[in-house]
Amino acid sequence: MIDPRAAIGEVHLTVSDLDRSLRFYQTHLGFTQHQRDDRTARLGAGGADLLVLSQCETAPRVRGTTGLYHFAILVPSRADLARVLRRLVDTDTAMQGAADHGVSEALYLADPDGNGIEVYRDRPRAEWPYVGGALRMSADRLDLDGLLEESHGGEGDLARGTVIGHVHLHVSRLSEAEQFYVDVLGFELMQRYGPSALFVSAGGYHHHIGLNTWAGVGAPPPPPGALGLRHFVVRLPDAAAAAAVVDRLRAAVVPVETILGGTLVRDPAGNAILLQPVKSLS
């Protein structure tokens, strides 16, 4: 098993217009700009970087491929989620949906390049729904009016303590994805969602990574440099925990590359993951 302290770190995206994307993430969601140069910006909630945007004006926009379904911003409390919703309403932001998943309450939208975004808050683990000992996430209606009542009229920036809670990916084949993420990386299978999606995690979390074939079984990877996901970081607590995963990758004859103080690997669908021990993060 992967170290139970493993978690999701930075999400790196290619965008077509950095200025436009920065306006969106700061104005509509309340991100703080941590650092910027001509073509790259790092955003967060005042702590560690959560989102890294890289501009490429000629990047192709594709559909029907593997890649990002959404990345998920986890806020510390229901009141913090309410303030995000208030901000979305006040800025006339188009939303794609909202849901009560039993384990969490979530809002869904997309950025100007179509990158999917979830903003959510977790319920306490003691309240998570289990059936026959197995976790059962759902997709029930979220009481948006009741949630807005908790905003107390304020919108505010993203709360300090906000993190990337999970990423959800389009893959080509679920069987290949399960073998890679569970059998090789060592995540635990938490739930299957019909024949087309599954959810895996470390340490008993409801999910750190979602995997689906909703772009089509056998979907190809996007062309190099396309808009969307460049890679995402899986943070491991120390070098030993990272080395254990890399050893399993090498034993499975999965190609790896050492970059940015970590190990870059691609899943069978071409999605890139950077395995990075915490002490290597800057």
Image (spheres, rainbow, N blue to C red):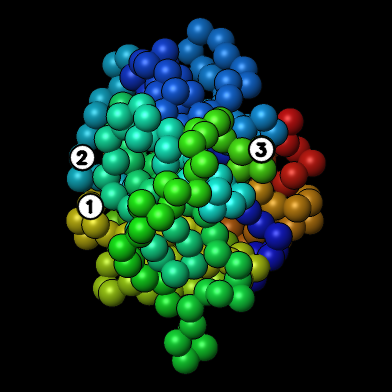
Q: Residue, x 75% and y 53% (percent of image)?
A: 237
Please name the amino acid that badge 1 sits on: Ala
Query: Eyeballing the image, is 119 above or below 56?
Result: below
Give the residue at the far top of this rendering: 38
Disc 2 residue type?
A: Arg
Q: Earlier in the sequence, mark 3 or mark 2?
A: 2
Q: Is residue 75 left or right of residue 177?
A: right
Q: Earlier in the sequence, mark 3 or mark 1?
A: 3
Disc 3/disc 2 C-alpha distance (Å): 34 Å
Q: Nearer the viewer, residue 107 or 44?
A: 107
Residue pointed to by mark 1: 215
Q: Amino acid at mark 3?
A: Arg
Q: For the residue labelled by badge 3, is the local secondary structure a helix, a strand or a loop?
A: loop
Q: Are there few (<14), some (14-19), or many (20+) residues within 10 Å of tag 2?
A: few
Which element type, helix, strand or loop, lies under badge 1? loop
Residue under pointer 2 = 63
Q: Position of residue 66 (x, y in %)?
A: 31, 47
Q: Decide if residue 11 is on the left or right side of residue 23.
A: right
Quadrant in the rendering for residue 162: top right
Q: What residue is drawn where x is 36% and y is 52%?
A: 144
Which residue matches tag 3? 160
Asked whether disc 1 touches disc 2, contact meaning CB atoms under 8 Å apart, the reply is yes
Q: Nearer the viewer, mark 3 or mark 2?
A: 3
In the rendered image, residue 103, in percent from the top left (x then y), is placed at: 49, 67
- Residue 223: x %, y % from top left: 29, 33
